[in-house]
Image (spheres, rainbow, N blue to C red):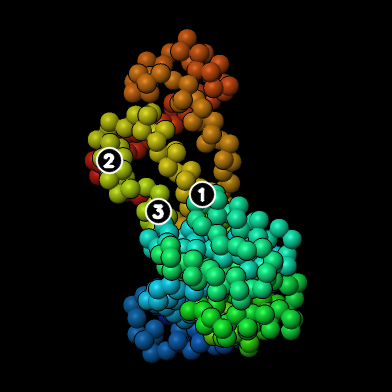
């Protein structure tokens, strides 16, 4: 979708004046981009009409750079379509009860773990996971495994009545000062009366502060029917779109708020347990239009790299004192951020620089680490001493070829030169 929109924008940027005739092709391209991304037809129709009306308005006609004004209109309309403002979780209640609902296969149980991890890391909360999916085989065990991996407590009592489990979990949370209670409920293969009756019973008895529908972004337009089916009975406070990092058209994100009035609160952006991000409409619109998403990159970095550590690394880079030991530390930090290609896609002009389709094999980074770890501390601090005999020893120790070692050293030297040029003000970034 982003590629098609970029093509349409490119044709308009150079125009000295915007008229109904000369934006016709661009509007057709935008319409096709949205429909191919599985955005609802009615949503596309209204979106195109609104963009066209504003693009042909008096403000654009008087502008010295109508192409840039058109891009701003397009961005503002996308932001509005995506919900306008971010919709944060309820934070004032203690404990805050969050009930996650959804169909089987949507990733609900895993999302419970991700949400608990997010609340602990980003909001400094003390969450409790509650196992209330008493029907799906191994659902309780799956949640317990996630809790163990994250070191987050899981309250479970096996397959007794769900309302009794929640009642006892609330008492446990008060005793242990848990400020968020995340309830993993049962799912079904489709929305049915039995499923809804149980969820409505929980809602009526315990009045959750948040009822979040977990939905697979790859469902396409069927997602709207599922959201409305749950919302008619439960008054959803928001939804979480999973698998947004996969091979998905993503049109559901542009249709949800407009058609259901249910805000998107979070998106699952990787399979890792820290792969859950708060949904910001403006950031998503900027990514679609290849403007980048530096704030989301900063959020990810803040979660795994301390500010002092980052400043220290930057200072070494700019001063020319950056060595292979520092490079090794940087590699380890980058790996914590998740798939590197997901970060590259967030850079401004990622499509223009060809970064949106980059594929990076995690093994390649592991190989680099193996090479550096096979060096002595002195060699890491003084890579200039690495001659043939030393390289042969490192090759045997790391299981990598001498050619790979030479390539690493060459790339490292080129990176140091580039950093030096940037520090001297002789080089500008391409964005």
Is 20 positioned to the left or the right of 225 in the image? Answer: left
Q: Tell me the number on the disc at residue 198.
A: none
Q: Residue at x 42, y 89 (%)?
A: 57
Question: Label 3 neighbourhood size at 10 Å, few (<14), some (14-19), many (20+)?
Answer: some
Give percent across and percent down for residue 27: 56, 79
Q: Is residue 66 visible?
A: yes
Asked if residue 11 is positioned above or below residue 28 in the image, the reply reads: above
Residue nearest the observer in this picture, 44 or 158: 158
| Quadrant the N terminus occupies | bottom right
Q: Residue at x 74, y 61 (%)?
A: 137
Q: Earlier in the sequence, mark 1 or mark 3?
A: 3
- Element at label 3: helix
Give percent across and percent down for residue 272: 56, 52
Question: Label 2 neighbourhood size at 10 Å, few (<14), some (14-19), many (20+)?
Answer: few
Q: Which residue is mark 3?
A: 303
| Quadrant the C terminus occupies | bottom left
From mark 1 to mark 2, how far is it between C-alphas? 22 Å
Q: Which residue is mark 2?
A: 312
Give percent across and percent down for residue 385: 37, 15
Q: Quadrant of residue 167?
A: bottom right
Residue nearest the observer in this picture, 80 or 163: 163
Give percent across and percent down for residue 280: 45, 70
Q: Which residue is mark 1?
A: 338
Which is more foreground, mark 1 or mark 3?
A: 3
From mark 1 to mark 3, how far is it between C-alphas? 12 Å
- Element at label 1: loop
């Amino acid at each position: 979708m982003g590629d098609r929109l970029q093509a349409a924008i490119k044709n308009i940027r150079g125009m000295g004046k915007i008229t109904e005739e000369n934006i016709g092709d661009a509007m057709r391209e935008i319409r096709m981009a949205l429909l191919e991304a599985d955005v609802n037809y009615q949503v596309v129709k209204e979106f195109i009409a609104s963009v066209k009306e504003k693009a042909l308005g008096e403000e654009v006609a008087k502008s010295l750079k109508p192409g840039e004004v058109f891009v701003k209109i397009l961005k503002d309309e996308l932001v509005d379509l995506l919900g306008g403002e971010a919709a944060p979780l309820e934070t004032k209640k203690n404990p805050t009860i969050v009930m996650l609902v959804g169909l089987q296969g949507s990733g609900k149980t895993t999302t419970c773990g991700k949400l608990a991890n997010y609340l602990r890391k980003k909001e400094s909360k003390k969450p409790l996971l509650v196992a209330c999916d008493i029907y799906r085989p191994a659902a309780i065990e799956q949640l317990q495994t996630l809790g163990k991996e994250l070191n987050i407590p899981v309250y479970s009592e096996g397959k007794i009545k769900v309302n009794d489990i929640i009642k006892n979990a609330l008492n446990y949370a008060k005793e242990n000062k848990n400020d968020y209670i995340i309830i993993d409920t049962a799912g079904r293969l489709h929305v049915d009366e039995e499923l809804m009756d149980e969820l409505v019973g929980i809602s009526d008895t315990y009045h959750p502060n948040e009822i979040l529908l977990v939905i697979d972004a790859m469902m396409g337009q069927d997602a709207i029917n599922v959201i409305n089916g749950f919302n008619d009975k439960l008054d959803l406070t928001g939804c979480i779109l999973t698998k947004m990092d996969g091979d998905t058209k993503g049109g559901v994100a542009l249709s949800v708020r407009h058609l259901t009035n249910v805000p998107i609160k979070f998106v699952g952006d990787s399979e890792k347990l820290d792969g859950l991000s708060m949904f910001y409409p403006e950031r998503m619109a900027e990514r679609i239009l290849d403007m980048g998403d530096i704030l989301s990159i900063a959020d990810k970095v803040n979660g795994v790299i301390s500010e002092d550590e980052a400043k220290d690394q930057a200072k070494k880079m700019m001063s020319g004192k950056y060595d292979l030991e520092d490079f090794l530390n940087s590699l380890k930090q980058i790996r914590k951020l998740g798939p590197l290609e997901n970060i590259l896609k967030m850079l401004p002009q990622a499509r223009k620089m060809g970064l949106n389709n980059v594929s990076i094999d995690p093994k390649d980074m592991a190989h680099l680490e193996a090479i550096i770890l096979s060096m002595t501390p002195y060699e890491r601090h003084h890579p200039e001493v690495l001659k043939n005999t030393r390289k042969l020893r490192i090759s045997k120790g790391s299981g990598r070829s001498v050619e790979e070692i030479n390539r690493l050293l060459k790339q490292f030297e080129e990176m140091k030169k580039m950093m030096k040029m940037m520090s001297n003000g002789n080089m500008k970034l391409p964005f």
